[in-house]
Amino acid sequence: MKTAVFPGSFDPFTKGHEELVKRAIPLFDKIVIAIGINSQKKYLFSLEQRVEWINQVFKDHNSVEVDTYEGLTAHYCQKIQAEYLLRGLRNASDFDYEKTISQLNAMVGDGLETIFLISEPQYSHFSSTIVREIIKGGGDASPFLPEGIKI
């Protein structure tokens, strides 16, 4: 079975994330959206809320699961026997950063392969960080969020 892990904090999960996973569904038998837990990081939304939102977005997709993990992503992939990491690229800066991380994950994860998908143009200009700032500033973030997520 071909299993991919799509790791992130997903604080919040955006339309860009949703689009990437939906495009990857035909490529894998299973996709695990894995929410990393970092005790040093301050999140805007609780872990429970993020899990609930993502489950709602993919409720009609049996091959998509949501899980949480602590520690290295590569170790988590080994634990659940995932052979692939799924990552999105919005721009050249993302590529430079993700290339280095993928090479390290391949070493630490004993050959873990990273699959990159280029973001669709309409999603390439925003990130969870930008969406959080809109929310904190009292703006309307709904254009950036999947239908199942109401803030």
Image (cartoon, helix red, strand yellow):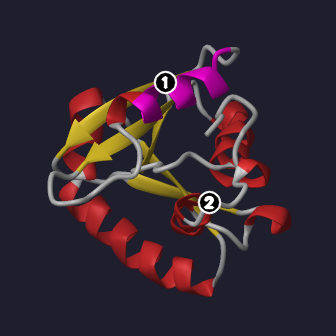
Whole-percent x and y of residue 62? 61, 14
Instruction: Return the residue at label 2.
Output: 138
Residue at 43 percent of width and 79 percent of height? 97
- The magenta stretch is 49-59
Say whether residue 66 is left or right of residue 141: left
Question: Could you tell me the amino acid type at mark 1?
Answer: Glu
Looking at the picture, tell me which residue is in the foreground, 8 or 149: 149
Q: Is residue 119 magenta?
A: no
The vertical placement of 54 against 112, above or below, is: above
Q: Secondary structure at mark 1?
A: helix
Q: Earlier in the sequence, mark 2 or mark 1?
A: 1
Main SS, magenta region, reads helix
Question: Could you tell me the amino acid type at mark 2?
Answer: Gly
The vertical placement of 134 against 97, above or below, is: above
Q: Report crowding for label 2: few under 14, some 14 to 19, many 20 or more residues within 10 A (C-alpha).
A: few
Residue at 79 percent of width and 52 percent of height? 143
Q: Secondary structure at mark 2?
A: loop
- Label placed on residue 52: 1
Q: Is residue 55 magenta?
A: yes
Say whether residue 93 is left or right of residue 27: left
Tag nearer the camera, 2 or 1? 2
Say whether residue 107 is left or right of residue 149: left
Residue at 67 percent of width and 18 percent of height? 61
- Label placed on residue 64: none
The vertical placement of 77 against 130, above or below, is: above
Whole-percent x and y of residue 114? 46, 57
